[in-house]
Amino acid sequence: MSTNEILGLARNAYAAWERQEGKGLGLTFAPDGVREEEGWYYLVVTATNRPRRSFEYYDYLHEIETLVEKELDPEGKIHVLLVPALANVV
């Protein structure tokens, strides 16, 4: 699967999550921030509206990761990790 396909799935999963949950994280996926290694996809993301509590932010990222994984591989052999970065660093 290509980087663009992975990013497209991730963006779509995030948009669906955002509609369902009503949370506006303002998540942006870095186009050059995708790496695949032994069945794991690492996607660099930034958020313009992080929750005040960090644990909530990481819980939200995990929910989105789970949605992307289900789209990629319902059997659970492919894993996705959203890697948070600072907006001015990416």
Image (tube, grey):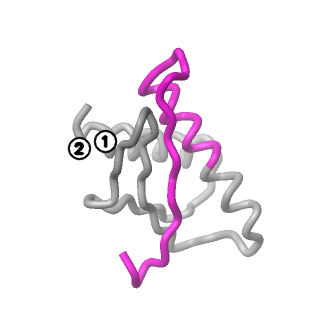
According to the image, label 1 marks what residue? 8
Q: Amino acid at mark 1?
A: Gly
Tell me what residue is drawn at x 53 percent, y 15 percent: 75
Residue 4, label in figure:
2
Whether 76 is among the magenta residues is: yes
Question: Residue 76: where, in percent of width, then height?
Answer: 55, 22
Q: Measuring from the top left, give residue 15's x and y in whole percent.
A: 46, 46
Q: Are marks 2 and 1 in contact (CB under 8 Å)?
A: yes
Q: In the image, 6: left or right of 84?
A: left
Residue at 40% across / 81% down in the picture?
89
- Cα distance, mark 2 to mark 1? 6 Å
| Mark 1 surroundings within 10 Å by alpha-carbon count, few (fewer than 14), some (14 through 19), many (20 or more) | some
Residue 24 lies left or right of residue 28; in this view the side is right
- Callout 2: SS: helix
Q: Is residue 34 above or below residue 24?
A: above
Up/down of 56 relative to 85, above or below? above
Residue type at numbered disc 2: Asn
Foreground: 90 or 53? 90
Residue lying at 48% horizontally and 35% vertically, measured from the top left: 68
Q: Is residue 28 left or right of residue 55?
A: left
Q: Which residues are magenta?
A: 62-90
In the depicted structure, whether residue 4 falls above or below residue 82: above
Percent from the top left, x then y, of residue 54?
73, 69
Dot 1: element: helix
> Whole-percent x and y of residue 83?
51, 59
* 10 Å crowding of disc 2: few (<14), some (14-19), many (20+): few
